[in-house]
Image (tube, coloured by chain):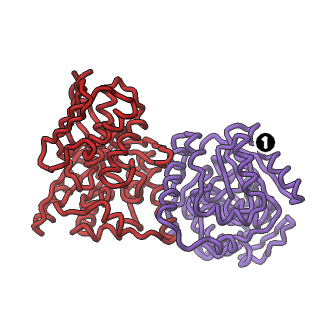
Chain colours: A purple, B red
């Protein structure tokens, strides 16, 4: 194989109570990436989008992943990569993870599937490190595995793919800036044992609900007493959107990753679309531009669109 | 029905990383309880064991549960109860929960099954309150439901019965005293977010492992970075027993409830028996008397032995 074209999905990290350990792939939005092997050792990155991301390989999230793979396998050849990003950087929808995971997945396919899923994740984490300073896998893992994944630990890497409930996701990305690093810094370093116990009751309930396809239990478990009360302050209209979504019929939801996007899990497509409409109109009313997305949970992650 | 005889199993609360939310029923040890309705409004408790527990109904764990049920349903009749306790009070194996759950379960059967499982748990929690000052359900829930249960919250009561993996439990009760109240007081009121995240990675992994029957994942998840390092100090030989159990082949394990009993989850019966032998000999060597138990996880909880 000389060339591969990929569709790389957005991902929702944390899933409310699963801070730093859970993530979920969706279908929309997604990035497109085309990778080809060439004989020169150079790595060339072209962004065919308007986000102004650096194209120098060592400063580009996809580029650094390819450099690490090239170095690890002592490859004599390089890669040319064309990226059409639709997942906005800074949206909280796993934009950097999509670039990183796409690069690792694409390179692996071009090299004849020499990497396991966990090895792809290992290399992709260098991209996350470049983007945010933290080698985390909560967006990369669902991007590679699809569905919902548990990152039980990153050192050593221990990733558990979970069941994929047949649920819809309504998400809104209000066009306000929340930097991952800021949104990490405002978190308290210490928490009470009491709220930790409440949180792990919710996380345990959420995992049980996901594995049993028990939608009511999933809904009852989507509560975050630790991170959301702090981070949601950075997101305009968060409380209103969450309350109205649940009134309309969402099982529950909250901040996607470190925000500012908000997601809701919903049983029916029509309900998800109604919620997306409400989300848009709440931001329209306050003159904040927003993008909304409705899709099912994506059970398969990155998709190969073309290979040649 | 006028009379019922029950076998009420011991239970292991916490399951290492699930402090205050998880519990599991075993087959051994167990209590025996005989309940009968009589026409006088009195509640009579007889203990046919040597633990010297108070028999005055309002001061007896089973008695207080029956008083609450009598009061709630405005019953004109009373109960006579004979208890043969084999689960030692203060063992950390759910001794008070067995009395409380047995009373609620027995009264319910005698009254024609007027209570749901959660209502039985509601009444049994008055017994736990009398015993330890805390209305907790982590031992009562598996006693009533059997298997492994998640107490997602106690206010409101939200209990999730989980899958029962085909595993053996080896447990040892060293005859040293650790009071639940002491063992609660030494816990830190605040913990770091970092260790909380590690803990909820483990709890999420444990629930996923239980639901998927993934024994390796169960083993990798039986780690407690918050409670065990503090509480295990109160239990002589804890580290040695845990280390040797895992060397012999246990998936993992730790403190049962608030101790001093220690339990291990094991795939094969022979391995569980070997571990129990090692546990006994470690305490023999240090002149601490101990009782050991080997049984499977008990999928059904309280068992009716006789009804008339």
Q: Quadrant of residue B183?
A: bottom left
**Helix, strand, or loop for circle 1?**
helix
Depicted B137 relative to depicted A72: above or below: above
Q: Quadrant of residue B161?
A: top left
Q: Position of residue B233 (x, y in %)?
A: 28, 71
Quadrant of the snapshot with the C terminus of chain B:
top left
Count of marks, rendered view: 1
- Mark 1 crowdedness (10 Å alpha carbons): few <14, some 14-19, many ≥20: many
Q: Is residue B264 left or right of residue A60?
A: left
**Residue at horizontal 22 percent and vertical 43 percent from the top:** B56
Specify the subunit that label 1 lies on.
Answer: A
**Residue at horizontal 56 percent and vertical 61 percent from the top:** A21
Q: Is residue A252 left or right of residue B30?
A: right
Q: Is residue A102 left or right of residue B106?
A: right
Given residues A183 and B241, the one toward you in this image is: A183
Q: Position of residue B202 (x, y in %)?
A: 45, 60
Q: Which residue is mark 1?
A: A273
Q: Position of residue A60 (x, y in %)?
A: 74, 74
Say if residue A69 shows up in the picture: no
Depicted B40 relative to depicted B292: above or below: above
């Amino acid at each position: 194989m000389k060339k591969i074209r990929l569709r790389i999905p957005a991902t929702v990290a944390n899933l409310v109570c699963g801070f730093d350990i859970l993530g979920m792939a969706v279908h929309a939005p997604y990035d497109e990436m085309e990778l080809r092997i060439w004989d020169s050792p150079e790595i060339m990155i072209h962004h065919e989008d308007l986000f102004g991301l650096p194209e120098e390989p060592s400063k580009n999230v996809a580029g650094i992943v390819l450099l690490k793979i090239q170095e690890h396998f002592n490859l004599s050849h390089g890669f040319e990569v064309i990226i059409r990003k639709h997942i906005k950087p800074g949206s909280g929808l796993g934009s950097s993870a999509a670039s990183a995971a796409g690069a690792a997945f694409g390179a692996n396919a071009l090299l004849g599937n020499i990497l396991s899923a966990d090895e792809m994740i290992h290399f992709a984490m260098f991209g996350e490190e470049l983007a945010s300073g933290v080698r985390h896998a909560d967006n990369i893992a669902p991007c590679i595995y699809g569905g919902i994944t548990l990152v039980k630990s990153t050192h050593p890497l221990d990733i558990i793919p979970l069941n994929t409930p047949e649920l819809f996701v309504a998400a809104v990305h209000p066009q306000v800036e929340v930097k991952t690093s800021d949104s990490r810094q405002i978190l308290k370093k210490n928490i009470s044992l009491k709220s930790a116990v409440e949180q792990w009751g919710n996380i345990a309930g959420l995992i049980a609900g996901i594995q049993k396809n028990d939608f009511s239990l999933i809904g009852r478990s989507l509560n975050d007493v630790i991170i959301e009360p702090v981070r949601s302050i950075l997101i305009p209209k968060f409380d209103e959107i969450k309350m109205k979504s649940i009134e309309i019929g969402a099982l529950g939801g909250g901040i996607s990753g470190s925000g500012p996007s908000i997601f809701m899990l919903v049983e029916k497509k029509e309900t998800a679309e109604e919620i997306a409409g409400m989300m848009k109109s709440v931001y329209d009313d306050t003159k904040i531009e927003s993008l909304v997305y409705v899709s099912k949970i994506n059970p398969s992650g990155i998709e190969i669109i073309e290979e040649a």
